[in-house]
Image (cartoon, rainbow, N blue to C red):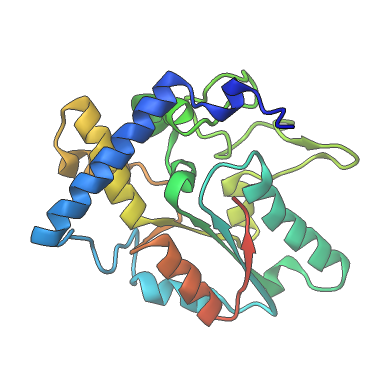
């Protein structure tokens, strides 16, 4: 017997409309690309070097890449912390490990500053609640969290903010393909120029988050550099 409620099976109207827009927008972009190939920056950068060179920083004894295609509570950020803590407990300090987190598909909002969360309603669109208010988030809850924001039973407070993980050497990157598609759909819904919305999104990337041609491209590169794959979505 299926005990799943109708509310669990059926997306809320706002979410359903957004998903319809995504499907329509993606189809439109796909058709357009058959005539005019979708233009993506082959080597998007947030600083010196290019997307391939970014992976040269992977040099740890133990290496892992976390694939984040959608929001999944605290796990995309808790698991990198657990990886570092348990390696430290078994004799390998943080500096001797390499951790890559790939934000792609529905996981890309975590790559952006609070301004974009409020402006484009990422919390409502991607079903991400603020851990403090329990309402759709208008901020990135994993960027510079407050002390005590995240607690784990049996462990207590955990420092799993993106900035905190970066301080421990964790590398974050984001899918440029997903940014291109989602920003175009957002632009359609707001009657704005897709190029300008994409530009706005790129301007709102968090410090140290590296755009990649695509998330799956980045996952492949990380594995080529010796990272074990872990699904975190």
The percent position of residue 151, horizontal first and vertical second, equals 78, 35
Give the residue drawn at x 65%, y 77%: 60
Left or right side of 191 for 227: right
- The answer to whether residue 35 shows anywhere in this view is yes
Front-lying residue, 157 or 174: 174
Front-lying residue, 56 or 8: 8
Of all residues shown, which one is farthest toward the front?
A: 1
Give the residue drawn at x 43%, y 38%: 113
Left or right side of 37 for 137: right
Front-lying residue, 200 or 34: 34
Work out which quarter of the rendered image holds the N terminus and state it: top right
Front-lying residue, 152 or 68: 68
Left or right side of 135 for 38: left
Give the residue drawn at x 42%, y 20%: 13
- The answer to whether residue 200 shows anywhere in this view is no
- The image quarter containing residue 95 is bottom right
Residue 32, placed above or below residue 24: below
- The image quarter containing residue 196 is top left
């Amino acid at each position: 017997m299926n005990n799943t409620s109708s509310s669990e099976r059926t997306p809320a109207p706002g979410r359903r409309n957004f998903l319809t827009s995504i499907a329509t927008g993606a189809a439109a972009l796909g058709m357009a690309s058959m005539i005019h190939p979708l233009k993506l920056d082959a080597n998007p950068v947030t600083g010196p070097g290019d997307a391939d060179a970014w992976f040269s920083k992977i040099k740890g004894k133990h290496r892992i890449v976390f694939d984040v295609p959608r929001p999944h509570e605290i796990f995309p950020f808790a698991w990198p912390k657990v990886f570092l803590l348990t390696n430290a407990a078994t004799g390998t300090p943080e500096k001797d490990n390499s951790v890559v987190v790939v934000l792609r598909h529905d996981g890309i909002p975590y790559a952006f500053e609070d301004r974009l969360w409020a402006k484009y309603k990422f919390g409502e669109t991607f079903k991400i609640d603020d851990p403090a208010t329990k309402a759709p988030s208008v901020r990135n809850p994993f960027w510079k969290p407050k002390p005590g924001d995240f607690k784990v039973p049996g462990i207590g407070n955990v420092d799993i903010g993106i900035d905190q993980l970066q301080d421990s050497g964790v590398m974050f990157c984001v899918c440029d393909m997903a940014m291109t598609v989602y920003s175009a759909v957002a632009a359609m819904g707001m009657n704005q120029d897709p190029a300008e919305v994409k530009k706005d999104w790129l301007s709102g990337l968090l410090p140290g988050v590296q755009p990649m041609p695509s998330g799956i491209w980045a996952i492949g590169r990380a594995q080529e550099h010796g990272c074990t794959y872990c699904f975190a979505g």
